[in-house]
Amino acid sequence: MDPTFATQIHDYDPGITPDTGLFWTVAFPDDSVDADMEDAEARFKSSDLAIADYGNILNGLFHGAPPAAGMVSFDIRWSGATNRGTFTNAGQRFKMDFVQTGAHISWQGKTGSDTFHTTGGAQKVNFAQIARSRSGVFFDEGD
């Protein structure tokens, strides 16, 4: 990786919300996500999401130049339980049930005439997990 980002030519991100400072976050419709903890399967999918292409991470953070119009599509699938567990921190009022799994990502991005996509072959997955957490006022729900 080039720590100066001099070789980076695309940086797809939804930007920073001026009034709140919330960054790199997009609201998706409920039907974009489906998860089944029992079967250890989940899916997160979006098609033709209009998104800014800032060119590189530094421009994405500091907005030195206006972004180009970009579009991305992705399909992330989790499956095949390898480990299950629960984590609780009562002092912080936090609980999490989790299933570690395998995963596969299909991704495509486009800016102008530039297009990029994943290939259909095998992918190396270092870590994938489906989780359900409860915290704060929801800490005692679901027991």
Image (spheres, rainbow, N blue to C red):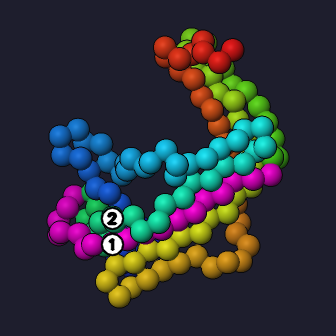
The image's mark for residue 101 is none
The residue where tag 1 is placed is 70
Range of the magenta residues? Answer: 62-80
Residue 93 visible in rendering: yes
Residue 68 is a magenta residue: yes
- What residue is shown at x 53% (from left), y 17% (from top)? 138
Q: Are circles 2 and 1 on residues that touch, CB within 8 Å?
A: yes
Dominant secondary structure of the magenta stretch? strand
In which quadrant of the rendered view does residue 75 lie?
bottom right
Among numbered discs 2 and 1, the one appearing first in the sequence: 2
Please provide percent x and percent y for residue 5: 37, 71
Please provide percent x and percent y for residue 6: 34, 76
- Tell me if mark 1 has few (under 14), some (14-19) or many (20+) residues whose alpha carbon lies within 10 angstroms of its own: many
Secondary element under disc 1, as helix, strand or loop, is: strand
Residue 126 visible in rendering: no
The residue where tag 2 is placed is 51
The amino acid beneath tag 1 is Gly
**Looking at the image, residue 9 lies above or below residue 20:** below
- What residue is shown at x 72% (from left), y 48% (from top)? 41
Q: Residue furthest bottom?
A: 113
In which quadrant of the rendered view does residue 2 lie?
bottom left
The amino acid beneath tag 2 is Ile
